[in-house]
Amino acid sequence: MSKKLWYALAAVFVVTLSLLIIGCGKGGDGGEEAGEEAAGELTGEYTIVALVPLTGSLGTYGENSKEAALLAAQDINAWLAEQGRKWTLKVVPEDTQTEPAVALRKMQNWFGDGVRFFSGPQASGEASECLNIANSNQILFISQSSTSPTLAIADDWLFRFCTDDSIQGPAIAAVAAAAGVKHLIFAWQGDTWGDGLQGAAAAKAEELGIEVYPKELRFDPMLEDFTKEVGLLDGYVTDLLEQGATLEEIGFCIITYEQVVPFMIAASEYPQLREIAWIGSDGTVKSAAMLANDTVARFAADTRFISAMNRPEAASRKEHVTKHIQETLGREPDAYAYNNYDIIWALALAIDEVGYDPVKVKEILPRVADEWTKENGASGHVVLNEFGDRAFADYDFWLINDNLEWEYVGYYDSRADIINWERQVY
Amino acid sequence: MAPWLANGLIYASALALTAGGITLLYITTRTFNFAHASMATVGFYVVYSFIIFIGGSPYRYFPFAFLFGALLGVICYYGLNRPLLKRQASEITLMMSTLGYDLILLSLIQMYCDFLTSNYKLFPRRVNMNMYDLELFGINAATIILPLMAIICLSALHLFLGKTKFGVAMKATIENPVLAGASGINSDRVYMVAWLIGGGMASLGGAAMAMAQTGTPVMGMNSIPFMFAGAILGGLHSLYGGILGGFMVGLAEYAGVFLLSQKFGPWILGYRMGIPLLLMAITLLIFPRGLAGIPWADLFGRLTGKKRGVQA
């Protein structure tokens, strides 16, 4: 090979290497030195990636969260301009497909591009998958809806603007008791969230004297057809009836996301399943996909399918977010979309204060979230506990009424351990 | 009919069509078509789109699903497969090229879903087509219509290959491409028609599959292992074997898994994917050429002989 060719190859190598070095560590146009900048001196564009499930079983919730995040970015940029700041915020929505491996891959890719701050991912299974890489690389991520108790870990890099299921589990058991259920059958998706919530609900149900049916319907989170599971469920109900229970005493709790739609379609073929009490969770509450299917909406109304959801407190920006999502997607947002709006604001305000530095942002985040959400939050006042999770919340109960609309019917007061009914359901 | 068996029949019919398409493309062009996954999904979205924009029963739009799939098959042939075949590409290259085509189709499906969501406020990423189904003799029409449709398609294909001049030429090319070429058969046209039929079968199968499962942008991708399992179980060298293999895999996934879970407990449901694949592995261990390699005539002959013997 000629010398000239060697020189040319060396030049190409050096240029490529330089470009790579320059490219790495960029969270935005502000560059890697941004973290060194003092408050108020940020310049350029900084990125927060919103890991949202735009496809898969949390697709509808993901779309709501994406719109909330984009609205927050728009509001923050207006506020930054008003304050005379020299930096702008860019929020990039990334589809995690409701799959832990995809969420991890997306986080890794963006980390490679220098991004250190993420909102989401939405599901506990996804958050759990991202936790190791975040902990070892100081990536700060805040989930709007990961509720698994197993992810309540002190001093990790995952924050959660929702409470964990150690509160929702008892809420589910309390509503089963209120419905007069004496035998409770569980079906749940086998992942970090499903296992955690089922465990918490089953433990509390037993404490309340409800017998938990020993055969468990734990299913693959990716499953899309439930004819076999429902066939078994019908068999379990028959088994309980043969043991002397009545249909009014049998309850069925399903812990899943929008797979509840095919589950109910399959269940609608079995008359006795329409006679038992059905209970859902925050994964199914206010599901627009359920209303979109007449068979499912009717089945849910007949079974008084009741689901719990983190109770959003009275908050000044709630209407603002609701209006935006209604305009863009034509539907009511779920409670976790409000959380995502607050997450983007809390991160942006912390970055504005200490720079694009995850270590410093992590230190001040609880204070910033507390101060900002007290007056401005869309999801209410966010106080974080020692695990970086929302410290307390009550749970609203929603069901699909005879007009086939979601209706708020009461709430579970977690501190008093009682349900305050808005109207009589059982 | 028990709902799990009804759904099993629908799903098995859908797999029979898609596995048949995979086998047809393999025996004609040596290509394992991974794009079958998204072609199947496209079939579902074609039917769904007609329903939401025009309305009516899903079955009247199934021919459009076939036509759309056929078009995608022809595009794949002229855009990818033909140039690679001309360069005598290896089977791996041919296979990987269809994987690329599949990813392009998947992206287009996602974009189409975004379009439907933002412009029409629909929920195209999670559709249960059985809500549009009709009732026939007190059960869902799909339980009767779709297995019948699979049988009609198979019969039409059988007649096409056996009774038409082009079909005979196609069969000859499948059995011996060199000799067929020497006898003046236009193999290029034969391959194109194979892609046309194979693509059509994939989309038709996808439209049928959505009557048993939730229709999502990744519906085909989630079912592709079973489509291939059906084709392999069938023996890969026989079109009819592929169709039979698809049907058996589909039925095993539903009826087999359900019956086993009733007997041994719900934990069996976790092995829903493993059981049809196990069936495939066991069949191949006993009959390495798959279902097509089983000496059916011999077996029936022996059975009849035994009976005769008893009677005698």
Image: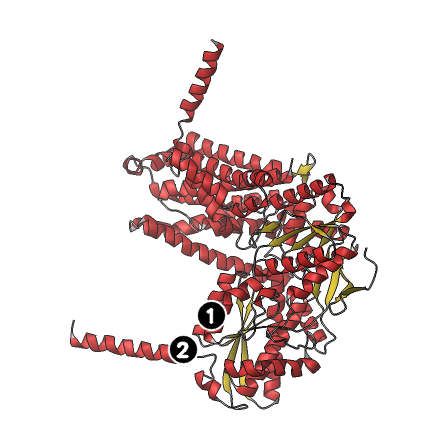
Q: Is residue A380 left or right of residue B88?
A: right
The crowding category of the residue bearing disc 1, from other C-alpha atoms within 10 Å (few below 14, some 14 to 19, many at least 20), is some
Secondary structure found at label 2: loop
Decide which of A119, A332 is in the foreground and name it.
A119
Alpha carbons under labels 2 and 1: distance apart: 17 Å
Name the foreground residue: A25 vs A201. Answer: A201
Q: Which residue is mark 1?
A: A133
Q: Residue furthest top?
A: B312
Is residue A300 depicted above or below B251 in this figure? below
At label 2, the amino acid type is: Cys
Q: Chain of mark 2?
A: A
- Image x and y of residue A99, in percent: 53, 60
Secondary structure at badge 1 equals: helix
Mark 2 residue crowding within 10 angstroms, few (<14) / some (14–19) / many (20+): some
The answer to the question of whether label 2 and label 1 lie on touching residues, with beta carbons closer than 8 A, is no
Disc 2 vs disc 1: which is toward the camera?
1
A173, above or below A266, in the image: below
Which residue is situated farthest in the left direction here?
A: A2
The relative height of residue B44 versus residue A333 in the rendered view (above or below) is above
Residue B55 seen anywhere in this rendered image of the structure: no
- Residue drawn at point x = 35 percent, y = 37 percent: B174
Number of dots carrying numbers: 2
The colour scheme used here is secondary structure
Say if residue B269 shows up in the picture.
yes
**Residue A277 appears at what percent x and percent y?**
75, 51
Q: Quadrant of the C terminus of chain A?
A: bottom right
Q: Label 2 belongs to which residue?
A: A24
Picture quadrant of residue B11:
top right
Amino acid carrying label 1: it is Ile
